[in-house]
Amino acid sequence: MAHAASHHDVYPKAGVFTRLTAWFHDTIEHMAENHPRLRRVRALEAMSDAQLDALRIKRSEIVDHVFRDCYYR
């Protein structure tokens, strides 16, 4: 007597639109996370208060400092 085993996906695959939307979201997120300005914000946030004082930047103004040329054009 022969036995056959069939394997079924426990989790069904997402639809094409769902996968396309997820890919688009991941791509945009990756681009934003690797933007030089965001890297600069993170580098400044990692500095101590003394280091920021030497640069004359307040911790609460880091984002304003990094994006200062984008405001009020």
Image (spheres, rainbow, N blue to C red):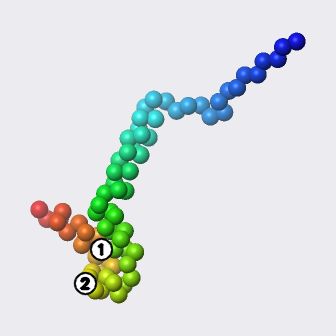
Mark 2, Cα crowd under 10 Å, few <14 / some 14-19 / many 20+, is: few
Q: Amino acid at mark 1?
A: Ile
Q: Amino acid at mark 2?
A: Arg
Query: Which residue is identified by label 2?
Result: 56
Percent x, y for residue 64? 25, 71
Percent x, y for residue 20? 41, 35
Does label 2 or label 1 sit earlier along the sequence?
2
For image coordinates 38% across by 41% down, the residue present is 24
Q: Secondary structure at mark 1?
A: helix
Q: Which mark is residue 23?
A: none
Query: Quadrant where the C terminus lies?
Result: bottom left
The alpha-carbon separation of the residues under discs 2 and 1 comes to 10 Å
User: In this rendering, would 47 be left or right of 70?
Assistant: right
Q: Which mark is residue 62?
A: 1
Q: Secondary structure at mark 2?
A: loop
Q: Quadrant of residue 57?
A: bottom left
Q: Which of the pair 24/31 is nearer the observer? A: 31
User: In this rendering, would 47 be left or right of 1?
Assistant: left
Q: Which of the pair 60/31 is nearer the observer? A: 31
Percent x, y for residue 31? 34, 51
For image coordinates 38% across by 51% down, the residue present is 30
User: In this rendering, would 20 be left or right of 6?
Assistant: left
Q: Quadrant of residue 69?
A: bottom left
